Image (cartoon, helix red, strand yellow):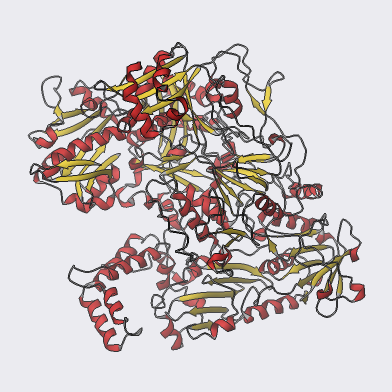
Amino acid sequence: MTTLTSPDGETATINARRTESLDAPNILKLVQPSTEQLFGRVNVVNLIEKAVLAVTLSNEDDELLAHAAFFDYPNVPGVDQADWQAWINKYYNCDLSTPLNTLFMHYFVAKPEYARGAAKEIIRTMYNAVPDLHYCYLVVPQGVYPDKNISDYFVPITPIDGELSANGFYVTACNRSEHAASLFVRTAKVEDHDDLTPIFNRQSNMLQRTYGDFFLAELIEAQNEHMQCIVAEVEGTAVGFMSACDDVSLDLLNQCFELGPFHGLHKPHENDILEPGKSSRVSPAPKEKEESRPASVTSQHSVTSQNGNTDAQQVDKPDSQPAEEGTKVKPALGDATNMGQSTSSLLSESSVAESIKSAAESYHSVVTSKSAQSQHSRTSLTGSGRQRTPLKAAPPKRFVPTYCGPSNSFCIQLFCIDERYEMRSQDFLGKLFELFPERDFAVITVPHLVPEFPLLQGFVRVTPRCPSTLAQELYVFHRSGLLKSFVVRPACKKDDDQVEKLVSTLDLHGNLLADLTQFNRARRDQDGTEINAFVAEVLDQIVGVAIVRREEDIEYIRSHYNIEDFIYFNHHRRDEHGHLHHFALNPVFKHYSKHFLKEILRQAHKTCLYYPLYPSYVEKEVVNQHSLVSALHDMVPVRSRRQITYPRDILGMPHNLPSDRVLEKQQSYALNHINRKLTLEPKVTVNARIVVVGASDVGISFLETFAFCPHLRFNNLTMISPHGLPGELPPDTLRDNMLGSSECYTEEDYATMSLRTWVNVVYGKMTFIDRNKKFVVVNGDTIVPYEHLVLCTGSQYQFPAPTEADISKLATTSEAPHRPDRRYKGVPPKNLYIVNDAYDSAVVLYEVENNLLNTEGKALVYGNSLDAYCCVQTLLTMGVPGERIILVEPPLNYQTRCFNNITIEDTIFKAMKDCGIQIFSDFTLAQWNDGKGGEEIYAASFTSSTKPMRLECSAVFAFYQKQVDVDAFKAINDACLVYDGRLVIDAEFHTNDPSIRGAGSLTKFQRSYHADQWTHTNFNSKEVGIQLAMAMLRLFDPTLEPQPEVPQDILKLIPMYRAAKVTSAVLPGGYNYLHVGKPGLNTPLDALMAQNDYGRELITGTPGGSPEYFRLHVNQYKMVETITCLSKKVLNNGNMMCLYNVHERYLNNLLSRFDEGLIKDLYSYFKEAWCLAIFHDRFPDFKEEVRELLITKPSPDVEALEEKVRQMIEDDLTISKSQRKQLDKDYLEGGAKRAVDTRLLSFLTYNYYHLPMYAKPGML
C-alpha cells in the first residue's frame, strides 16, 4: 500500500492492480479536456483489451484514482507496429531501446488532485512488474504540451537532426534509473552484517537459532575461491544477500532430475556417453518407452553440495522391492521444459491398450497376483480383488547419459532480499557469474512448499525423474540467460540450417521444417491460409522458432469454448486471431518464452493465439499438424462450452439455425490460449505435491478445477488410479453403454479437458499411507510423496462371496453360514466378471465376442442396480439371445429400486421378459460349481426366503454391491485414519490428518453432525469435487481470502449442494432413460407424492407409445424439480438437464398450458424454437443478472422489489391479490421491466451466433 497526498493535504491509501474491462466506465469519468489532445479519441475498452500492461490505482473504497495503458509499439498513425524500431531510430538516438526493454504509454488519466503522485506510482509499478523493462516512451503530437504531472517524468528526447519526426510527433522518455533503478551488487563485507540481519530475521529466524547471532558475519568472513558472498546495495545500505559455492552434488542431481538439455551440468568431454550403447548406464524408469517427459511423482529433501548434510531422504518402504520394479508412472505432458524431449506422447501416443485383444489375453495371466499391472495393456484390468500383486517382469530402463567432464555449475546456498526490492533479484546473477567465470550454470533447490519468489522467474524448473523422491525442486540458470540481445524476427531462407539443428531432437520436427519451407516459398499454404514463421536470435544464433497460421475456425472456437473468459471477442478483428502450430525454444532462454509470444503477436499483427491438444487416439493426420510447444505453461487452458442440440426438423429454414461454421462437427480437442493482455501477466507457481487417489467423478472434477485456474500453475498434480485417467480409450458407444452414466463427464468432455497435459498419472492401487513421512505406496513398491493427499477412490463392484449355504438341504438365505456382503478372499473364477469403468467394459466386450458368443452357454447377470440392466441390454445388443440371459436380483438394500418409478420398472421388466430373459428376484448367491471350486463357473446356486435354485451358466457378470476397495480400506485403516464404515470427514473434507482430505462415496460425515443418512453419494459428484477444490485453493490462491476458522462446537451442519443428480442409461428393450432430480435421500416416490408440499407432476405419453413417456415434477414454488424420460428415440440429455430448477413461467407458462390441454407431448413441446434459449449454456448467468436487477435498489431512496416482497410476507407467507397487483405496478413503473427487457435483448444479441431463430429489434 502507498499513500498519495493532494495539494490540499488530503491523503489516500492506494492499491495498484491490473485494469479490468469493468473499470472502463470509471476511467471515462477521469478524462480531462487535455486527455484527448494528448492521446486522441480512444475506445477505452478496446485500449484495455489490447494493452500488454494496464495499471489502475484505487483507494481503500475501491474508488478509481488513476489509470494508464502501455503497449509494445507507439501510437503513431502510419507507423507499422511490427517495425517501430526503424521509425524511432530514424529520428532519435534510441539504439538501446528494444522490444524487450521498451514500452509506450498510450493512455493516462487521473483525478486532478492526485495526478502527480499517481503518475509516479504507476511508473514505479510498471518497472517493478516488468524487470526487463528499462525505457518507457510517450509519443506527443506536435503542438501539444503534456500536463506538468506527466511532463515532470517524461522528458523530450533530442532528435538527431534537431527536428520533429516526419509524422508530426515528438518522443518523450522515462527511464528506469529514475524510478526503480537496478541494484548495485558487490562482494559482501563483514560490515554488512548489521544491515542484513534485520532482513533475515523478518523472514525467518531459523538460521539465527541454529548458528547463532553472528552466523552471517562468520559466513562472509569465510569466503574463498569456492564460496562467495555478494550483497545488493541501495544508497550505501545493504538490502539483499546471496551466497554461492561451486561444490555441487551432480551425481545426485542427475539421478533425480532430467538434466540432459543442460549436459548434466558438466562440461563436455570426449568420453561422454550421450546416446544409448553397450557402455552406457541406465537408471530406473517407468515402463512405457515412449514416455519422454517425466514429471514429479516426487520429492522429499534438499540438495546443496557433495559435502553438505542434506541429501535424498531414504524412505522406509513397507516392501523390500525397489521402486523401479513396479508401477508405471505417466508424467504430465505439459511439462515441456526440455526442448529436446520427445513430443509424440502428447500428439501421437498409442491407444490406452494397443488392442482390446491383448488386454483380454493378459487378463487371466494375473489371476493369482495382487494389484496386477499388465505390461502390454498399461494397467490392471478390473480394479478389483482379482489383482493384488505386481508382476515381476523386468521393466524397460531409461537411458541416462554418462558425463565425464568437470562440473560446470555452482549452487546458490543462501539468498535474502528486502521485499521492496525483490523484483530486482536477478541483478545478483551478473555479479555471481563474474565470481565463477569457469561455470556456466547457477542452480538452486527449494522445498516444494516454498512459493516461487521473483528470483526463480528467470530460472528454468528442471523436470524431476521418475521415481525420484527428492523433497526439492531444482531450478537452473545459464550464463547466456543474462544476454539481453534476444531478437525475434521473421524467418528467412538462410535460417533453415540453424533451425534444423535446433529442432532435430524433437518429434514431428519434419512437419515444422516443412511448414518453414512453405513459409519461405509462398508465405501461404496451398489453400491460401496465411503462414507466419518467426525465429528468436541471440548473438546471430537461432535459439527459437515458431510457426503461426491465421485462425480460420474462430467462429467454431467462440461457440465451443469460453474464450470470452479472457477476451472481449467483438474488439478483435477476424484476422487478429492466430493458430500456433509449432513453438520451440532453447531451454536456456525459457524465461523469454512469453516475450517470444508477445513479439509473435506484435509482428504478426495478431492479438490472440490458440493451440489445440488432441486426444491420444486421434488420427496422426490431424495431430501431426502440431508439435508440442514448450510455451504451454505460458498459455491458459480454455473450458469447453456445452452445446445446444438443435431440432433441425422443427426449425426448418437454414436461417433459423446457426451457421455451418458453428454446427460443424470437428474432432474434440483441448484449447489453450494467450492474448496480448496475458503476455505480461505472471502466473503464481505452486510446487506443492498434491496427490489424488482415485479417478472418480469427484477426483476428476477436483483436478479439472485446479488445472483450469488461469492465474495458477500447479507443477505437481498427481493422480493414482489402476487405469489412469478416464477418456483415454477411443470413443465406443457400445462400451460406454455397458454402465449407467452420471452425466458428470462425457467422452467429449474428457477430450476437451486433456487433464493428462497437467496431471502426472501413476497406474496402480494405493496400498499404504505413511502419514509421518507423507508418502503413499502404490502396488506395494512405488513411493509417491505428497504435501496434500486427496482420497476419492469411491466405491466399486466387488467379486461376490458365496454364503456357502448347502442348497441340497433346502437352506434359506437366513440359514446361510456367512453374510452375503462379506469380502471374497479367494481366487475368482476366470469367467466371473465385474465392470467398474470403460476399461473393464472393453475387456468384457472382448470376452463376450470371442468366447460367450461362440458357445451355447448362458450369461448370468447378478445384481439389481441400474448397471445390471445396462449389462443385460449390452449383451442383447452384441447378439446374445434373450433365452441365454439370466437375471438374478438379490434382495433390495433400499426401500426403492434404482428407478423409483413403477411405470418404468414395469416397462423394463416387461421388455426383458419379451426378449426371453429369465428373471429371478430376491435370491442370494450361495455356491458356484456346487461348492467344488474350479477355475471357471459352470453352475451357480442361490437361496431365497423360500426355496433355493441352481442355474447353469458359461459366464457371470456381477453387479452385486459397491464397496470400498479392500486395498484402499487397508491403507486407510493401517494409517490410523478414522474409518467408520466409510472414511470419516468433516464439512470441509478434512480427515483426522490435516494434510489428508476425502470426498465422494468413500466418505461419510462425522457422527457429531447427526446426519448419518447423508453422504456425498446423495449429491452431484462433480459439484462435490468443485467444492473440494475451492476449499483447498484457499491454501494456494493469493486472490482468495482465507476462510475464517469457526470454533468446532458452533457449527455442526453438513454442506448442502444444489446441482441436480443425474442418471442416464440404455435399458433392455432399447429404451433410453434419463432421470434428473434434486439431490437427497432415497425415498419412495409414493411417499414423496403424499407430502403436502410436493407440488404436482406432469406426464405425457406412455413407454414405447406415441408420444413416449415424459414426466416432470414441478414443486410448490413452481420450479422444475424432477425430469424423467423413457424413450426408444435418442434423448437430448444436455437439453433436458437444463430444465432442472427452472421456473415454469420461463417455460412459456408450462402449467397453464398443460392444464388447458395444449401440451400433448412434452418432447415436442421442448423442441419448439422458443425453448432453445433456456438450453443455452449462458442462460443461468442471464437469470442471475435478472435476479440482481430485482434485488438492487433503483435509487437510494427507493426500495428494491425484493425488499418489498419480504415486507409483505413477514406476517403472512402468502401475498394477497391487491399486494400482487401493487408489485406488478411497481415492476412496470419502477423501470425494472425495462431493465429486464434490455438484458434479455442483450443476451439474445450477444449470443446470436447460437440463437439466430430469435427475432431482434429492427428485423421487421
Residue 1112 image offset from top left, x and y in percent: 51, 78
Image position, residue 294 (x, y; %): 59, 35
Is residue 656 at least partly visible in the picture?
yes
Q: Quadrant of the C terminus?
A: bottom left
- Does any portion of residue 752 appear in the rendered image? no
Q: Looking at the picture, tell me which residue is in the foreground, 707 or 1160.
A: 707
- Viewed as shown, does residue 1049 lie left or right of 252? left
Q: Is residue 832 left or right of residue 60?
A: right
Q: How many marks?
A: 0
For the N terminus, the image quarter is top left
The percent coordinates of residue 213 (x first, y second) are: 40, 25
Height in image: 314 above or below 1043? above
Q: Camera-side residue: 415 or 766?
A: 415
Q: Is residue 70 above or below residue 793?
A: above
Where residue 669 sits in the image (x, y, percent)?
51, 48
Can you tell which quarter of the image residue 943 is in? bottom right
The answer to which quarter of the image holds residue 830 is bottom right
Compare residues 574 and 118 and report the one nearer the observer. 118
Residue at 71%, 71% (x, y): give it. 864
Instruction: From this view, report whether residue 263 is shown above or below residue 913.
Output: above
Instruction: Indicate left or right for 429 with 1032 as reference.
Output: left
